[in-house]
Image: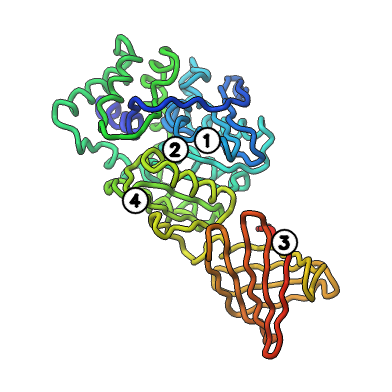
Amino acid sequence: MKVLAALSAVWVVFGPAAIAGQDVSPRVSADGFVETRDGLSLYYRVLGDAPDTAVVVHGGPGAGMGSILPHLAPFADSITLIFYDQRGGGRSSLPADTTRLAPEWFVADLESVRRFFGLERMKLIAHSFGAILVARYLELHPERVERLVLLGATGPSRKEAAEVARSTAGLDSATASRRQELINLLLSGQAEDPLAACHELESLADSSSNWRGSNCDMPPEAVRYYFHYTARLGPRGFGAWDFTERLKNLSVPVLVVHGSEDEAGAPLQRAWADAFADGRLWMIPEAGRGAIADRPDLVRAGILEFLRGVAHRSEGQGEMTSQNIADEIAGKTIRWTWTEGPVAGTTHEHEFNEDGTVVWRVVEGPQAGHSATEEEYAALEIADGVIAVSYLAASGYTLTVVLNFEDNSMVGFASGADRWHPMKGTFEVIG
């Protein structure tokens, strides 16, 4: 039993501990409760009122929204954030029947949140063990996820994740011993004051950490329940998970964010990026596992660009890898509507294939229905959120278009052997 308890504990303390920091007073637009399929209540909090929306899936499972909210709250100036406390923690229901802490219920709860807020497709931000919950959700509801960001994610394979999480690197022997003592007291339910024990446990982390999220930001009875039940039984229910090969057929764009200074955790993050057909890894320089705490402005700007569907400029800002150059173009279908130039009033669709070919078709205009496949295109990000695309058509004309993802405007030139034509229009990504 002690071995199982210790293994379960690694998911609880996998993230950096909270330390004193600046006060965060986010603008709360609404809060309340979502009723689950089995009649429990999930506490939610909405920050911001921007048109675009993202749902935040915290770690644990059951660690509560306070474990990540301080670092995501500034996003609410640009995007509406929906936080919710998972069952078995925070201000949500603490099930008397602990079989209700099985993975299927955590997955069903995320679906209940989606339905409650009327979201056809969700942009998700998952932290720590939230990545495992979302991966299971993706297996069942891939059509419901538009984009996914992973922050300090628990590894896609339990075996490798456990090896990294058990590490006590950076702790002296006395601190490591006290840490394990507190974990055992909390998991066994024997801590006299679980809230005080939780705060002490978090205080034993690296004192240089910039992390301000806390697993202790919940009522005392929820802290006791979370450690004694949810933190032990939740991960155990997922079994020997391994998502390294099970998600490769999904087309969901995924951004994995991690700090370059966490060398032990880096392989797990690369495994997540490789687990998706459209996954990319963004290694943040001068940052640890809590990269969003160490480099908040940089990480926030990059995540917002990604959620808006804008290709990310990574030069000088850490390495962001993907399978294709200008990965916001490869594999996408973009509809171009021309407002000026020789084809004004015409709408084309361009399908930019992963193999470098492009298929275009006229969907509106005098030549509607006409289509062709061109052998090769090139795409290059020339500024933040601005991509130039060019290809040589079989007709002998070269089409070069500059796409501005900030306002979905475009300008371009169609040039032949003896003439060229300037054009303007708008575009939208449709697939």
- Alpha-carbon distance for marks 2 and 4? 19 Å
Residue 285: image tag: 4
Residue 426: image tag: 3
Q: Nearer the viewer, residue 131 or 36?
A: 131
Residue 266: image tag: none
User: Could you say where residue 334 lies in the image, as x and y percent from the top left?
Assistant: 67, 63
| Circle 2: residue type | His
- Alpha-carbon distance for marks 3 and 4? 36 Å
Which element type, helix, strand or loop, lies under badge 3?
strand
Q: Depth-wise, is mark 2 or mark 3 nearer the camera?
A: 3
Q: Residues within 10 Å of mark 2 (few under 14, many from 20)?
A: many
User: Could you say where residue 150 lies in the image, as x and y percent from the top left?
Assistant: 45, 44
Picture residue at 40% right of the left edge, 54% below the top: 317
Residue 56: image tag: 1
- Alpha-carbon distance for marks 1 and 4? 24 Å
Say if mark 1 contacts mark 2, CB within 8 Å.
Answer: yes
Task: Pick whichever of labels 3 and 1 is earlier in the sequence.
Answer: 1
